[in-house]
Amino acid sequence: MTDPARPRLGRNVFALSAVSFLTDVSSEMIYPLLPIFLTTVLGANASFIGAIEGAAETTASLLKLASGWWSDRVRKRKPLVVLGYGIASLMRPLVAIAQSASQVLLIRVADRVGKGIRGAPRDALIAESVDPSIRGRAFGFQRSADHAGGVVGPLIAFTVLTWHFAELRTVFWLAAIPGALSVLVLVLFVREIPRPGEVASPGAPDLTQPLGSRFWRVLFVIFLFTLGNSTDAFLLLRANQLGVPIALAPILWAALNLVKSASNTPGGALSDRIGRRPTLIAGWLLYAAVYLGFARAGTAWQAWALFAAYGVFFGLTEGSERALIADLVAPERRGTAFGWYNLAIGLGALPASILFGYVWDHAGAAAAFTMGASLAGLAAVGMMIVAPKRI
């Protein structure tokens, strides 16, 4: 029997989770095929793939800071969320007409512009839509839905390609359908949440209030971890090296997202119970172990096992990390805080992916994965030191 006093996730969390699901169906019909498309069709190398993904994520993160700050200032989250999802849904399928790796770079950056506009306001809206005691579960549920889309999207692509219903570029065009549906759900079902002080103080809020030293220390450690967290495109390339056929890349990607989806809600809820700090540290140590495994793996079955373990890392960290950011700052600065959080991740993503690709090209895959594992372990130690023990 459901406890009527227990806080509920509510309409906004469910609607935004549905939007994330549909958006990820669209993007994951394309993403697992993109490294292979770039290398075999367009002739790109590992370093250029790293540059594409790093530049795309850095662009998104810069915009997240601006959009998060602006949503705090105007006290409106939804318009920016709609704009961001709309741009991404429009740009993403244009990969189908790309004739060079440079064109893919421009399309990916434009796609990530949309992600940058929507990210911080959406996360702030989720935090404001639920009771603080279930914040980890709310973020975990949203991430779970997002990754469920990552299961369905690759399976659609695999089915279309395996049964020869369409060629590779047509799959990219088909990704426009769930993208359009996501925008429709967002417009119809997500509502703005009034924030404290809106009625009493109709003017612009005071955005000079500091975010606090605890926030900045935690953010620095998250940035350190990000320097070892390169694009997952390299994991797909490594799996291919280990003997996973190109045709099974969408299935491998779907399996990863299935584990992510299954573990995100429990992982976020775990952070509500035992704290953000221990949950996050456990996730980062698991990441280090997985990357060491990729450095030493030699067979295809090991790639499948490591991808599954890698999915659990997301379950432990995605919800708890976002809930930690929301816990550390005042509600009127939450959009800005999520903007800085995403900026830190994006600023780390570009050098992380470029450095990883460079080490891969010049010293081999094992050295690149060992480097990533070392940075993750260092960040876990840093989080033990800087994060408040009661959070």
Image (cartoon, grey):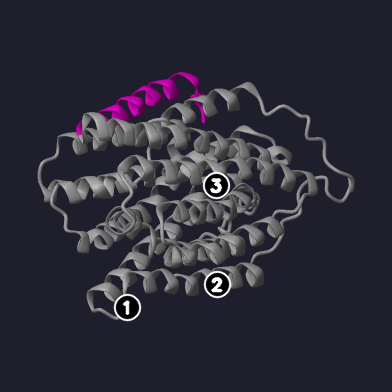
Compute the Cα span from label 3 to label 2: 28 Å
Q: Which mark identifies residue 135?
A: 3
* Label 1 neighbour load within 10 Å: few <14, some 14-19, many 20+: some
Residue that numbered label 2 is attached to: 180
| Quadrant of residue 330 within the rendered picture | top right
Image x and y of residue 28, in percent: 39, 61
Q: Given this view, does label 1 or label 2 mark the residue nearer the observer?
A: 1
Q: Secondary structure at mark 1?
A: loop
Image x and y of residue 5, in percent: 58, 56
Residue 346 lies left or right of residue 366; in this view the side is right
Residue 305 lies left or right of residue 16; in this view the side is left
Q: Amino acid at mark 2?
A: Ala
Is the C-beta separation of discs 1 and 2 under 8 Å? no
Number of numbered discs present?
Answer: 3
Q: Secondary structure at mark 2?
A: helix
Image x and y of residue 90, in percent: 56, 66
* Label 3 neighbour load within 10 Å: few <14, some 14-19, many 20+: many
Residue 17 falls within the magenta-colored stretch = no
Residue 148's place in the image compared with 203, above or below, is: below
Is the C-beta separation of discs 3 and 1 under 8 Å? no
Q: Which mark identifies residue 166?
A: 1
Q: Given this view, does label 3 or label 1 mark the residue nearer the observer?
A: 1
Which residue is at the front of the view, 67 or 247? 247
Residue 242's place in the image compared with 15, above or below, is: above
Q: Amino acid at mark 1?
A: Ala
Which residue is at the front of the view, 12 or 221? 221
Q: Amino acid at mark 3?
A: Arg
- The magenta-colored residue range is 366-391
Residue 160's place in the image compared with 145, above or below, is: below
Compute the Cα span from label 3 to label 1: 42 Å
Residue 30 seen from this side = yes
| Quadrant of residue 114 within the rendered picture | bottom right
